Image (spheres, grey):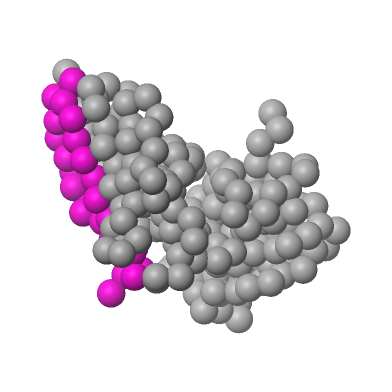
Amino acid sequence: DTGVSQDPRHKITKRGQNVTFRCDPISEHNRLYWYRQTLGQGPEFLTYFQNEAQLEKSRLLSDRFSAERPKGSFSTLEIQRTEQGDSAMYLCASSETDWNEQFFGPGTRLTVL
Amino acid sequence: RKEVEQDPGPFNVPEGATVAFNCTYSNSASQSFFWYRQDCRKEPKLLMSVYSSGNEDGRFTAQLNRASQYISLLIRDSKLSDSATYLCVVNPHDKLIFGSGTRLLVRP
């Protein structure tokens, strides 16, 4: 399967713990995006990378959130000191350029107790 | 006001019906437009891009009115498998802005 993959698919954690998610984009795609989706809403943009450079961060991305794409391939999204409001589906997407279709991974569903 | 607004539905229609969804967007600088489909607890998948001239893909027709900042999706001859949430999406630059989605239920 050469699509976008995400790991883990589900994560349950206690409030205050740190969590890290991984995304592996389609191999030839330069752009990698992170979105968050809560029940009944569409995905909301968090941040994106062009190769290894993080080019934009949403104001939704508080100081507790950090994302990296160190070698321009896979990316990680870390949430420190998780809060119950962080519970959501975290989606990763990749594309060749900014105007091309974005292909989404299956998401990581985070539950903060 | 949300950047992309859609009627949440649900639209409950019989098989074979024609159904239309609309959305409006606020950013006049938006450059590209899409409809994505999302099944329950799955990731969004591109249904079709939307062009100013209008475009058709089988039973699906999408229209864009830039002057009114309005996008539509028409589904003809609905199938049970069309049941899903349809997300209106605009790309002002570098990222996708999603509406909250319109839920479609097609009944036998």
State which quarter of the image contains the N terminus of chain B. Answer: bottom left
- x%, y% of residue A72? 81, 57
B51 or A30, nearer to the observer? B51
Of all residues, the one furthest to the right in this rendering is A71
Residue B33: percent from left, percent from top: 44, 53
Position of residue B105 relative to residue A24, above or below, is above
Residue in the picture at 42% in, 47% down: B51
Residue at image point 59% right, 54% down: A99
The residue stretch that appears in magenta = B1-26
Residue B12 at x, y percent in the picture? 15, 35
Residue B59, quarter of the rendered image = top left
* Direction from residue B81 to residue A34 in the image, left or right: right
Quarter of the C terminus of chain B within the rendering: top left
Which picture quadrant has residue A17?
bottom right
Residue A18 drawn at (x, y percent): 63, 67
Q: Nearer the viewer, residue B57 or A104?
A: B57
Q: Is residue B10 above or below residue A12?
A: above
Q: Nearer the viewer, residue A6 or A26?
A: A26
- Left or right of B6 in this view: A103: right
Residue at x 27%, y 21% (from the top left corner): B79
Magenta segment includes B60? no
